[in-house]
């Protein structure tokens, strides 16, 4: 259910209790899915050098983590792109 209007006896007079419960469960599942999307933002890809500078990391330290697969990164052409969220999470657990 994608409607934001509340489900009440007044708005659903023809539904049985089991139909109302099913409808509420579907609405609950939809809301949980929307909440999960909000909790997990889309990756923000940017050049590794810029991302390291934005966070205050040494570029070589971050590059080595990218090569080793410790942060979410990929090569495009001759440069590394990094998921800024992944880099921030890794940095919060390890010092420079």
Image (cartoon, rainbow, N blue to C red):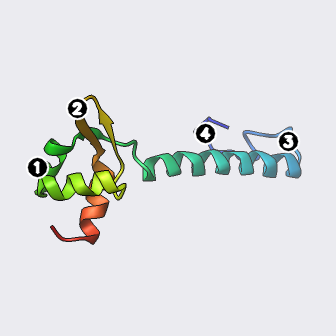
Task: Give the SS element for disc 3.
Answer: loop
Q: Quadrant of the N terminus?
A: top right
Q: Which residue is mark 4?
A: 5
Q: Quadrant of the C terminus?
A: bottom left
In the displayed structure image, the side of residue 66 where residue 23 appears, left or right: right
Question: For the point 31% across and 37% down, which residue is it?
Answer: 75
* First in residue order: circle 1 vs circle 4: 4
The crowd level at tag 4 (other Cα within 10 Å; few <14, some 14-19, many 20+) is few
Q: Which residue is mark 3?
A: 15
Which is in the foreground here, disc 1 or disc 4?
1
* First in residue order: circle 3 vs circle 1: 3
Q: Which mark is residue 30?
A: none
Q: Which residue is mark 2?
A: 78
Q: Which residue is mark 1?
A: 53
As displayed, is residue 43 above or below residue 58? Answer: above
The location of residue 78, given as percent across then percent down, is: 22, 32
Q: CA distance from mark 4 to mark 2?
A: 51 Å
User: Residue 49 occupies which quadrant of the picture?
Assistant: top left
In the displayed structure image, the side of residue 46 where residue 42 appears, left or right: right
Q: Are marks 2 and 3 in contact (CB under 8 Å)?
A: no
Between 19 and 52, which is closer to the camera in this rendering?
52
Task: Give the SS element for disc 4.
Answer: loop
* First in residue order: circle 4 vs circle 2: 4
The location of residue 57, given as percent across then percent down, is: 13, 58
* First in residue order: circle 1 vs circle 2: 1
The location of residue 5, given as percent across then percent down, is: 60, 39
Which is in the foreground here, disc 3 or disc 1?
1
Which is in the foreground here, disc 4 or disc 2?
2
Between 37 and 89, which is closer to the camera in this rendering?
89
Question: For the point 28% across and 71% down, which residue is it?
Answer: 93
Task: Give the SS element for disc 1.
Answer: helix
């Amino acid at each position: 259910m994608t409607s934001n209007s509340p489900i009440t006896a007044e708005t659903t007079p023809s539904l049985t209790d089991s139909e109302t419960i099913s409808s509420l469960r579907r609405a609950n599942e939809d809301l949980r899915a929307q909440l999960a999307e909000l909790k997990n933002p889309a990756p923000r890809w940017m050049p590794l050098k810029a991302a390291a500078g934005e966070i205050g990391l040494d570029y070589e330290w971050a590059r080595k983590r990218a090569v080793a697969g410790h942060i979410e990164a990929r090569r495009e052409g001759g440069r590394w792109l990094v998921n800024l969220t992944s880099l921030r999470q890794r940095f919060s657990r390890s010092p420079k």
